[in-house]
Every structure is written in structure tokens, then in C-alpha cells.
Image (cartoon, grey):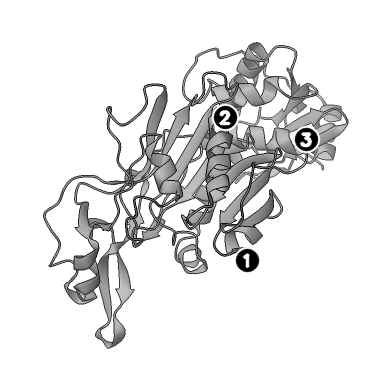
């Protein structure tokens, strides 16, 4: 028996819920992506849900996905079509769903159900084989990722400017989703390549004058910039480093200081003395992550070592820009001078800390129109550590790579 499902249509299940809430209302970024598609996208929601044993959480997840689709159809007219295929009412519809890649889900009673979504752009179809309650918080991200797969477009291109031009572990891990070109920070670039979806500066290297200007021009035109800063670098007023460029956006990364938080301390092995909770190695939970940002949904257990603080104020931030913290310490956060950090033995690190100074922002994003003539919104993202995506950090916290991947998809218009 292919499917153990009832064949009576459930008309009530298809009533449209037009309540606009955080799960149903599309983000401006999603609408922009859909409105700019070269061809319309057709979403088909394949379900077999009359079975009374289907968990209520699954019913809610599918209902919210359906409502999101219908809102997208209304808000991106001509670009989004929605089909609702109730496989409970037709064996033929069930077969079509299975042929499209829907995966049957077993129930404790021995019966099955499925809930799947397909996206078709021109002749290309991509399938989300299962709609789950667990993925409900990131359903919009999943939907847009599916759409981009259906569009079968060329992966977004990222230009990396760094001291070391060897491909990093995170570049290799993301090579199926993005293409990369790495340019030496010693090279003079007159302009950023036109196909660049974003520029990443992973080691805050000092840039040549022409390259510095090219990055500034690219960002002013609505580009995306990601910077990793190094709190261990000494200050230099005449340095053409990305941190100096960020100052014009109202993002200040103080030099010669490092952030500590004993409540987020990570265990570190200290020679023969065993493990010590080290307050300069921070493991962040959801309480320290801004979950209101679309690319942070579901993020947890993010690890940063040797991170600096990132500050701004109403007087520093240009009025047309929005400052959004991404990662912050707890109220036990504090800023420590590099000299004290370097001269204090790890075993004494916590005992020697200054008084708590309140939450410290250690990763942030600034968004807005830098140039009134720009047709796109610029985004500048800064992390206070150049170490958070090393092999060791990813091994310590795989969620670091997940967060970064979601960020890159978001900035490149894929979610």
C-alpha cells in the first residue's frame, strides 16, 4: 500500500489564515528577491493531513507555510503562483507528490502522512521533501533557498581580500553554494568586480590605497561587506584597515582591548593543571544572540575567542543607517586592556578581571543607504574576532559555520 491515508477532503484545513505575524509576514528582503526573479515561481504545497494522528505541531507548521505563501502571492503579484494539492482527496495527487520528491513520514499508529513543498521556475523544479515543526522558525529562509535552487542560478560570487590568499576551511566548506576569488591585501584594486555579491575581509589586513577606495565605493553603491577584526592589533591612525572604514559607518572597534565574560567562560586546558574556565573564550547561547535577525534564527552555542567590543552611539551613527547587534555578552561582560590580558596567567584570569561593565556587543550589522543615489541597501557586518572561523573554532562550535553560512545566504539574496 503506497499511502495509508484517508480519501475524504478536509475543506476546513484550506481556509486562509490572513493573520499577519512574525511567521506569516514576508520580510522586505524576500519580497525584493521574488519581485526580481527573471521568471515567475510556482509553489505547490503537497499534503496528506486528514489523518487524525498527525501531530498538531506539524499541522501548525504547514498552516503557517501555506499562509506565508499566500501572502507572498499577494505582495509579489505576477511573480508568485501558489497551488494547494490535497493528496487526501486524490490518489493521483498523492502520486504526483511522491514523484516530486515528497517523503512519507511514519506515525506511531502505523499510518503515514506527508507534507512537502515544490518550487518551479521555468522548467526547473526543486523540492522540500518534508515540512517540519522544527524548521518552522526558519521557514522563510528555507522557502527562499528552495526558490534559488529552482532558479538554478549561478552561485553568488564573493571577493575575499586578505593577507593570506590560501583558501580557508570555511571557503572550502561553502564551495558548493558560493564561488570565491581571493585577492592579496598587498594588491591594488581599482574596483571591486561587478559580479561580487559581497566582500569579505577576514583578517582586517591593511589595504592598499586604491583597494581601500574601491571597497568604500562598492559599499556606498549598496554592496555587502563582512569584516573580522583583530583586538590584538595595535592602533594606527594612518592605517588603511577595514576598521577605519567602519568608523565612517558609526562602528567603532576599540584597539588594544579585549572582551571577557566569566559567565560565558569556556573550559580551556592549562598545561598539567587541568581545565580552567577561561573568560576570554566565550561560548554564547541564544540569550546572547539577536534572534530577531533572519539569519540568526535557531543559532546557539556560538564560540568566539579573543574578541573585541563593537560600539556605536547616536552621535556616531549616521541617521540613515540602522545598527543591529548580532552577538553580545551577558551583563557580566567587561573590557580588559591588552597589557593586562597578556601578562595575567590563565589560572588567574577570572580573579584579576575588572568590574562588570554590562553587555558588550561583539558582532553587529549596520544597514542603510550610504549614498542617496544608490538603488540598493548596503550592509556592513563586523565580528570582533579573526579567530571565530578557524578550523579549531569550527571544531569547537560547528554552529559558528552554520551562522556564517546563513549570513552569507542572507546577504547574497538567498534567504
Mark 3 or mark 1: which comes first in sequence?
3
Q: In the drawing, does residue 299 fall left or right of residue 132?
A: left
Looking at the image, residue 67 lies above or below residue 249: above
Viewer-side residue, 198 vs 146: 198
| Mark 3 vs mark 2, CA separation in Å | 26 Å
- Classify 40 as above or below 263: above
x and y percent of residue 56 in the render? 52, 32
Label annotation for residue 150: 3
* SS type, badge 2: loop
Left or right? Give the position of 193 relative to 392.
right
Q: In x, y percent, where is residue 250?
A: 36, 34
Which element carries disc 1, helix, strand or loop? loop
Q: Where is residue 226 in the image (x, y as percent from the top left)?
A: 51, 45
Q: Name the residue under label 1.
A: 166
Q: Is residue 93 left or right of residue 231?
A: right
Between the residue at mark 1 and the residue at mark 2, the CA separation in whole angstroms equals 28 Å
Q: Which of marks 3 and 1 is in front?
A: 1
Amino acid at each position: 500500500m503506497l499511502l495509508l491515508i484517508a480519501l475524504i477532503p478536509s475543506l476546513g484545513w484550506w481556509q486562509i489564515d490572513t493573520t499577519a505575524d512574525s511567521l506569516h509576514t514576508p520580510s522586505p528582503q524576500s519580497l525584493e528577491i521574488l519581485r526580481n526573479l527573471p521568471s515567475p515561481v510556482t509553489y505547490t504545497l503537497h499534503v496528506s493531513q486528514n489523518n487524525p494522528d498527525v501531530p498538531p505541531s506539524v499541522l501548525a507548521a504547514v498552516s503557517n507555510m501555506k499562509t506565508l505563501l499566500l501572502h507572498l502571492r499577494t505582495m509579489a503579484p505576477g511573480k508568485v503562483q501558489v497551488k494547494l494539492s490535497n493528496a487526501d482527496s486524490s490518489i493521483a495527487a498523492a502520486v504526483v507528490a511522491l514523484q516530486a520528491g515528497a517523503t512519507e513520514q511514519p506515525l506511531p499508529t502505523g499510518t503515514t502522512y506527508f507534507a512537502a513543498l515544490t518550487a518551479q521556475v521555468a522548467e526547473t523544479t526543486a523540492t522540500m521533501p518534508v515540512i517540519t515543526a522544527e524548521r518552522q522558525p526558519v521557514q522563510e529562509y528555507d522557502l527562499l533557498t528552495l526558490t534559488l535552487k529552482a532558479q538554478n542560478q549561478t552561485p553568488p560570487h564573493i571577493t575575499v581580500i586578505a593577507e593570506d590568499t590560501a583558501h580557508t576551511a570555511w571557503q572550502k566548506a561553502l564551495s558548493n553554494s558560493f564561488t570565491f576569488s581571493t585577492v592579496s591585501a598587498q594588491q591594488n584594486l581599482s574596483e571591486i568586480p561587478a559580479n561580487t555579491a559581497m566582500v569579505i575581509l577576514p583578517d582586517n589586513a591593511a589595504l592598499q590605497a586604491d583597494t581601500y577606495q574601491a571597497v568604500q565605493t562598492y559599499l556606498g553603491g549598496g554592496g555587502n561587506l563582512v569584516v573580522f577584526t583583530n583586538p590584538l592589533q595595535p592602533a594606527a591612525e594612518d592605517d588603511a584597515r577595514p576598521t577605519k572604514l567602519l568608523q565612517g559607518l558609526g562602528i567603532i572597534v576599540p584597539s588594544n582591548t579585549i572582551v571577557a565574560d566569566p559567565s560565558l567562560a569556556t573550559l580551556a586546558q592549562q598545561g598539567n593543571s587541568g581545565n580552567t574556565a577561561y573568560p576570554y573564550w566565550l561560548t554564547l547561547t541564544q540569550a546572547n544572540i539577536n534572534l530577531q535577525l533572519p539569519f540568526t534564527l535557531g543559532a546557539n552555542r556560538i564560540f568566539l575567542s579573543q574578541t573585541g567590543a563593537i560600539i556605536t552611539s547616536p552621535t556616531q551613527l549616521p541617521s540613515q543607517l540602522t545598527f543591529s547587534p548580532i552577538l553580545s555578552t551577558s551583563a557580566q561582560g567587561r573590557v580588559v586592556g591588552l597589557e593586562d590580558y597578556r601578562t595575567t596567567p590563565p589560572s588567574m584570569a577570572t580573579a584579576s578581571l575588572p568590574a562588570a561593565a554590562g553587555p558588550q556587543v561583539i558582532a553587529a550589522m549596520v544597514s542603510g543607504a550610504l549614498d542617496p543615489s544608490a538603488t540598493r541597501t548596503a550592509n556592513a557586518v563586523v565580528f570582533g574576532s579573526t579567530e571565530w572561523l578557524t578550523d579549531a573554532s569550527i571544531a569547537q562550535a560547528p554552529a559558528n559555520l552554520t551562522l556564517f553560512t546563513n549570513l552569507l545566504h542572507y546577504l547574497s539574496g538567498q534567504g
